[in-house]
Image (spheres, rainbow, N blue to C red):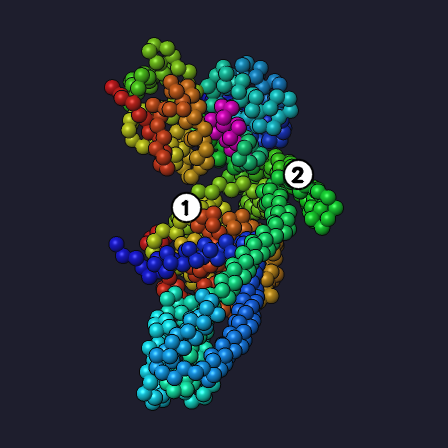
Amino acid sequence: MKFSARAVGMMLLAPVQNLWRRWTRSMLLRVITSTLVVGLAAVAVLGGYVTTQIRDGLVEKRVERILVESARDVDSTQQTFESSPAETPGELQQLVNDQLQALSKLGGESRGLVLLRAPANDSDVFLTLSGSDPALLSIITPDLRAAIATDESQFWQFAAEPDDGGPAVVVGAPLTLISPGDYELYFVYSLSDEEDTLDLIQRVLAFGATVLVVLVVFMTWTVTLQAVRPIRAAARVAARLADGHLSERMRVKGNDEMATLATTFNDMATSLQRQITRMEDLSRLQRRFVSDVSHELRTPLTTVRMASDVLYDARTDFAPSVARSAELLSTQLDRFEELLADLLEISRIDAGAAQLDFKDHELGDVVRDQVETLAPAASDQGVQLRLWMQDGPHIASMDAPRVGRIVRNLLSNAIEHAQEGPVDIAVSSTARTVAVVVRDYGVGLSASQAQRVFDRFWRGDPARARTMGGTGLGLSIAREDALLHDGVLEVSGRPGEGASFRLMLPCGSRGLGLREPLPLDMNENHFPEVGMRVSLASEAEL
Amino acid sequence: MTAKILVVDDDPAVAEMTGIVLRGEGFEPVFCDHGDRAMEIFRAEQPDVILLDLMLPGKSGIDICREIRAESGVPIIMLTAKSDTVDVVIGLESGADDYIPKPFKPRELIARVRARLRRNDSGATGVVRIGDLEIDVTGHRVTRAGDVVQLTPLEFDVLVTLARAPGQVFTREVLLEDVWGYRHAADTRLVNVHIQRLRAKIERDPENPEIVLTVRGVGYKAGGHTS
């Protein structure tokens, strides 16, 4: 099984489109999302700033205290050594051990001690440096040692505790032990207390921020919902109104803006209802009138029709002038009946009383039937009808007699204005639209004429005689019929170059597609591109 | 034999003119200009065809149609000034065989009247059986287990047309031509309504027909076993 690139694209796009649709349709979703994003960003920035400040403050203070403390301890140790009478290595060793013990007692558990022989020490007295914690040796970096060696003063840096990786501060200072020479004393202060404090503060802050964000989102949700709910209610009621439930109203609660909205909305609905009811009454009256006129006119017309036909059938027995009168009576009566039928039809459409019988029909067949019917009349006028049809079915849901009438009207009009040139007819379709174009190359019409061509009883050139008969209502009815199908009937033309009429009808209930099966303005050489030329039965006889 | 034709129309001009046309074709017209007198004239004259206007003073054409159908299968042709869908269907459902919209041409009227007078006796005579129905084509009688089923001549024609070729599908257009005598396309609702009426009379369950079957999208055919 192969998927086309289009199908795969659709599959990938579908969830995105779905999400986008929800995003664009729900104000609530949009407001909540933006509140959440803005809230989270604000809390993150603020939280970050506050934490940094607190941490820096905490550490700075502690480092200050550490430096003071270690400097004091180093000084006192130095003095002890300087004033000590110890001279032998054993005594010195004892003194160093005692001092280290005293120092470690003084510092408590949060301070580790390391005593190292300075790299530059060339004394031959060696001390066993047992008091220092060997685990701490790893965090005394060569940089630190080098800095102390060069500066000969106290120096410090941050480090990580060797056992748990927690933050620590290492302070080093040179110590001169008289005869054993220069040593370096390091204090390793753990910052875990500060870290704990910071952790606590951060936890409290995070908790606070979460609560704040949740609260803000909840509040936004509530507030938006309060605003959105009446809007949704209004939309629902409006939809019900549009569906024809004209007595639907919004509930008015309280005195606020929403209540004003509801009141105004209801006023509008009432006004609409009144208008629609009035229009319906008018329409009913009009329909009644049309029906009455139809009946009242048809009764005498029936007699006239029969009498005229009886006279016409017997015309051979009359004097020539009487016989001719009978002929004229008969033909003009045909015209009168046609006009009456068209007038009644257009008032029925105006009154909204047109009844359509929608069924799936092949537009090609409908068009071909009309072309076949009119081909003899056309060739009487020296006009050739050429029908071009794209392959494949052109099936649409339509009222076939009405669509047939549209095509017939377009054809009669084209034949009448073709000036003995050909008339091209093309049928084509897309997935959602079927179309037929009727193009003549005769009189043509200007842009201003094109605007009026569907007007009732309008004539492009009043001096021109009607050769195809017609009532002057044909194109108006054709356009109304097209509209009844949710379709469009358009015209385009230039003076002297003929006119092109295009009828487009939707295939189903989804309306016209965006793609047009045929262009409105078609030239003579466009038609062979549409499809095969259909040979007509009337041509076969010739 | 001169066929007697009852013209029920309240408009004197239409009635007179119709009379002239009918007489010109060798028919014998009788007239009625009021709905309330239609039944009495019908019983007295026993016409062969009735031309019935629907809008009448007194009793309406629809009611007259029903009353005549209750006692006779005489062909009824409605004359309608309205070609609105609903009126035509109501008229057909109340028993009219055919309709002519006003204004009509004399030739059209005569063609419709002749079509109603012509009996469907072109084909073979004898007895046709379909389902549990026995159709005596010559005697114009339909019986089910010895009981006579009352059909109008038109309904009888429809049934015989279908039953003569069991299983063969007849489109509505073919039936319009064979039974109603229309040469050109006509209103297929004529067929639909009369098939419904026929089914109501001959089917055991008109909702689930066994004798006159619908072929969706095409037309109708006679079903059931025949002998």
Query: Percent position (x, y) of residue A300?
Result: 62, 36
Q: Residue sitting at 54 percent across and 33 percent down?
A: B86
Residue most toward the top?
B146
Give the structural element (helix, strand or loop) at label 2. loop
Q: Say whether residue A254 is left or right of residue A228.
A: right
Nearest to the observer: residue A258 or residue A324: A258
Query: Percent position (x, y) of residue A305?
Result: 57, 38
Chain of the residue on which disc 1 is drawn: A
Query: Is disc 1 in the same subunit as disc 2?
Result: yes
Dot 1 or dot 2: first in sequence order is 2
- The mark found on residue A118 in the picture is none
Residue B117 in view (yes/no): no
Q: Which amino acid type is marked by label 1?
A: His
Quarter of image, res A18 = bottom left
Q: Residue sitting at 40 percent across and 22 percent down?
A: B206
**Circle 1 is placed at which residue position?**
A361
The relative height of residue A479 versus residue B191 in the rendered view (above or below) is below
Q: CA distance from mark 1 to mark 2?
A: 39 Å
Query: Percent position (x, y) of residue A355?
Result: 54, 40
Give the structural element (helix, strand or loop) at label 1. strand
Q: Residue sitting at 40 percent across and 58 percent down?
A: A13
- The mark found on residue A247 in the picture is 2
Q: Residue sitting at 56 percent across and 63 percent down?
A: A43
Q: Which amino acid type is marked by label 2?
A: Ser
Bounds of the magenta segment: B88-102
Query: Percent position (x, y) of residue A36?
Result: 54, 58
Residue most toward the right?
A255
**Quadrant occupied by the C terminus of chain A:** bottom left
Chain of the residue on which disc 2 is drawn: A
> Mark 1 near mark 2, Cβ–Cβ under 8 Å?
no
Count the marks: how many? 2
